[in-house]
Image (cartoon, rainbow, N blue to C red):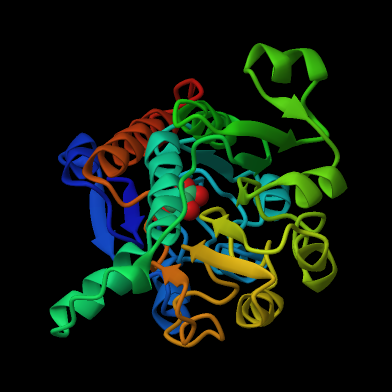
Amino acid sequence: MPVVLVAEELSPAGLEVLSGDFELRYVDGADRSALLPALADVDAVLIRSATKIDAEALAAAGRLKVVARAGIGLDNVDVAAATQRGVMVVNAPTSNIVSAAEHAIALLLAVARRVPAANQSLRGGEWKRSKYTGVELVEKTLGVVGLGRIGILVAQRLAAFGMKVLAYDPYVSVARASQLGVTLVDLDELLRRSDAITIHLPKTPETLGLIGAEQLARTKRGVIIVNAARGGLVDEAALAEAVASGQVGGAGIDVFVTEPTTASPLFGLDNVVVTPHLGASTQEAQDKAGLAVARSVRLALQGEFVPDA
Ligand code: MLT
């Protein structure tokens, strides 16, 4: 019976697709010393974002045929090394786009209306109204960095809040953007004109550190920054300094350069709302991702054609 290694939590619906015809084994993929030996004799491995399938892991997996990423980002998989070894890499590119978009908006609203700080204050026995005065989104300018599947959903939803939407994405045409009701601009103009900026890019050598001290210095004073895409796209130390100086009015951050983490220069700052990489953590997204990749693994290990998930 082919063996499938489940290296991170997968939805029961996904596991159900594999039960019966495959031996399921479990390991904590974030624990390298457990992962590498566990890969030795498996046919497929199922991961989310905490498990790194790099050249070393692939070399330890002599029988591996499929790496299945229950989610979108493939920055934790060495796709080129896998391809070289004849290992198929599958993901679920639309499974969590709505969840990620909704989480980015939740962070923006939480920062704009100071919800977590006010919640904490009231529970701590204070009734302070003026201290937690927020800002409205209507008629403000939103800058979307990366107008891909998630960026588009965020743009559409926040346009319904009455925001004017700018976007920076060198791969999108002006015609497509205007069809979406979005004004395409270069990064510099987006930084200068936006009241809130939200990042929706994959992590690549080109996007890493895209928003650093220099870029933050060019934003409107008091801008809100949201990053629910990947840690490191916004430089954490530079952002913390910009929030502390008031250049950035607040930030909503779901992703960190090192994950998991319980320490970041952002954690001590009042108007920063942080969550532990929860963008895809909804029942619906996990079911969709688990089902999609489990179906792909099933087809691949049975030697059948694997359509796009
Ligand atoms: C993704 O790339 O799909 C997300 O970061 C979700 C995740 O792995 O939790």
Res. 118 visible in picture: yes
Give the image location of residue 173, x and y in percent.
Answer: 80, 20
Residue 148 drawn above or below residue 38: above
The quarter of the image holding the C terminus is: top left
**Residue closer to the observer: 145 or 74:** 145
Residue at the spot x=82%, y=34% of the render? 185
Give the image location of residue 235, x and y in percent.
Answer: 70, 72
Residue at the spot x=48%, y=24% of the render? 306
Quadrant position of residue 92: top left
Residue 283 drawn above or below residue 95: below
Q: Is residue 169 left or right of residue 163?
A: right
**Residue closer to the observer: 40 or 155:** 155
Residue at the spot x=55%, y=69% of the render? 60
Res. 47 visible in picture: no
Give the image location of residue 166, x and y in percent.
Answer: 70, 34
Residue 31 drawn above or below residue 12: below
Quadrant position of residue 148: top right
Residue at the spot x=64%, y=18% of the render? 181
